[in-house]
């Protein structure tokens, strides 16, 4: 394991890094893992961003999204047969430290769509209580790094080596697809939760301090290809929701019954393409995918099972929906707004291609990142209730697919493509 140290980190350690700012982007999909931030969009007097980035950095191939904690950016990449974990200065893009480990470009069971998902895809997870950063490679390397000590490795284990994990099955007449590990780890209390997809358990919890296995879910079967797990409560019981290969899985997290299944809802998608992270509002969940489904579905989860509330013939293949003020938003092909209660389309517009993500800001605007580098600012339905209204857009920010999600922190936007071009706008 290689580490590059700089004197700047010593100065950083004197800062109150253990206390997270409200606008820190510590997790997949932001501060609350739902695509919503307490920061405003920055739209003032008809202007938004400079069309030129504040800085650029090359961070290696891969579709992981960056994290931002204070004035530090953590980001993964792949090059020269190694995964890299970098810490950059959020204001300048300067590299503060780098650690790396041997890793193939594709996971050992990868098949199909080579090139689209090369390198790491799972976004890291940051624990503000310890300063540890948790990463998961496409080849199953689950590791903890001490960000307060130049990225020193704390523990590591390989999931393929530790458990019996079959290749994702072929679905119907579609080709077999297995992109390796794509789902971000999730910290819950003393555990790091991982969608392992093993024969002994789909979801597993490991000690966040040591990496030792704490429990495995009663549900078994292959992992999905989503970006993240989602915490939720079901009748007061803490749970975690996942869109696995087989569909929605809701698992208990209370100590005496952790790993027990609360509910399952079958949702198998061609090419194993359950990609969009579920969106949760209380005990209601939205799931969506393309291909044989090509719909979005609203489910209600209780301790007695799952009830479908509605299903509408609009979908997201990639972008995870946002639920806010009775509306649902996502960007796949077009930016869409639905009524959360009924599923009816309120408006749609724009052109964002297959790759897309969006953030809902405190001033009721949507930052949209899609296609091959289209960055746009769009009004929510609160500001524009009847039609799609785009305030500002920059086209061709990148020249390739932007699978990584856009990040807003400290008044800056961080945009990345799958080839490792990371740009910061202010």
Image: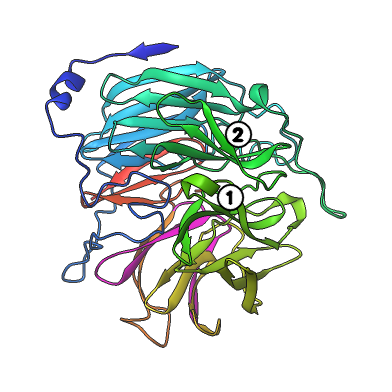
Label 1 neighbourhood size at 10 Å, few (<14), some (14-19), many (20+)?
A: many
Question: Where is residue 102, by image quadrant?
Answer: top right
Q: Which residues are magenta?
A: 346-373
* Residue 347 part of the magenta-drawn span: yes
Is the N terminus in the top left, top right, bottom left or bottom right quadrant? top left
Percent across and percent down for residue 251 are 57, 53
Task: Where is residue 375? Give x, y as percent.
Answer: 39, 58
Label disc, if present, on residue 295 of the rendered structure: none
Is residue 15 left or right of 289 when viewed as pictured?
A: left
Where residue 368 sits in the image (x, y, percent)?
Answer: 41, 61
Question: Which badge, 1 or 2, is on the more N-terminal residue?
Answer: 2
User: Which disc is residue 118 wearing?
Assistant: 2
Query: In front: 183, or 397?
Result: 183
Against 70, residue 105 (above or below) is above
Magenta span main SS: strand
Residue underneath mark 1? 226
Q: CA distance from mark 1 to mark 2?
A: 15 Å
Q: Secondary structure at mark 1?
A: loop
- Camera-near label (1 vs 2) is 1
Q: Is residue 112 left or right of residue 60?
A: right
Residue at position x 55%, y 22% in the image: 157
Element assignment for label 2: loop
Query: With 126 as the anchor, is 1 left or right in this view?
Result: right
Describe residue 273's horizontal placement relative to residue 138 as left or right.
right
Residue 336 in picture, x, y percent from top left: 50, 73
Residue 2 vertical position relative to residue 332 in the rendered view, above or below: above
> Residue lying farthest right?
173
Residue located 57% across and 68% down the image: 301
Residue 370 visible in the snapshot: no
1 and 2 marks in contact (CB < 8 Å):
no
Q: Residue furthest bottom?
A: 386
């Amino acid at each position: 394991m290689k580490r590059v140290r700089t004197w700047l980190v010593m100065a950083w350690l004197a800062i109150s890094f253990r206390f997270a700012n409200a606008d820190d982007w510590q997790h997949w999909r932001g501060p609350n893992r739902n695509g919503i931030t307490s920061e405003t969009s920055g739209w003032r007097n008809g202007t938004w961003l400079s069309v030129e980035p504040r800085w650029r950095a090359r961070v290696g191939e891969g579709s992981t999204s960056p994290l931002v904690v204070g004035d530090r950016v953590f980001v993964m990449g792949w090059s020269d047969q190694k995964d890299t974990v970098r810490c950059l200065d959020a204001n300048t893009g300067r590299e503060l430290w780098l650690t790396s480990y041997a890793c193939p470009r594709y996971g050992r069971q990868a098949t199909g769509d080579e090139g689209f998902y090369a390198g790491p895809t799972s976004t890291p997870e940051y624990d503000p209580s310890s300063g540890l950063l948790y990463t998961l490679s496409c080849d199953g390397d689950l590791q903890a790094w001490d960000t307060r000590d130049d990225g020193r490795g704390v523990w590591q284990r390989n999931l393929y080596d530790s458990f019996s994990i079959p290749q994702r099955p072929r679905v119907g007449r579609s080709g077999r697809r297995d992109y390796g590990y794509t789902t971000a780890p999730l910290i819950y209390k003393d555990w790091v939760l991982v969608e392992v997809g093993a024969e002994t358990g789909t979801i597993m919890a490991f000690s966040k301090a040591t990496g030792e296995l704490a429990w495995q879910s009663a549900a078994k079967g292959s992992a999905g290809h989503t970006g993240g797990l989602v915490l939720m409560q079901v009748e007061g019981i803490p749970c975690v929701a996942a869109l696995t290969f087989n569909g929605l899985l809701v698992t208990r997290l209370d100590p005496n019954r952790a790993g027990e299944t609360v509910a399952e809802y079958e949702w198998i998608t061609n090419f194993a393409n359950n990609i969009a992270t579920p969106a949760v509002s209380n005990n209601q969940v939205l799931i969506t995918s393309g291909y044989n489904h090509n719909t979005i579905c609203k489910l209600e989860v209780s301790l007695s099972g799952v009830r479908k509330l509605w299903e509408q013939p609009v979908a997201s293949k990639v972008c995870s929906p946002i639920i806010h003020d009775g509306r649902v938003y996502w960007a796949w092909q077009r930016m869409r707004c639905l009524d959360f209660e009924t599923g009816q389309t309120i408006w749609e517009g724009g052109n964002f291609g297959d790759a897309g993500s969006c953030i809902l800001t405190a001033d009721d605007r949507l930052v949209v990142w899609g296609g091959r580098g289209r960055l746009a600012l769009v009004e929510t339905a609160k500001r524009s209730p009847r039609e799609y209204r785009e305030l500002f857009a920059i086209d061709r920010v990148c020249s390739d697919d932007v699978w990584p999600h856009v990040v807003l922190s400290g008044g800056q936007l961080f945009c990345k493509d799958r080839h490792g071009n990371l740009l910061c706008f202010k």
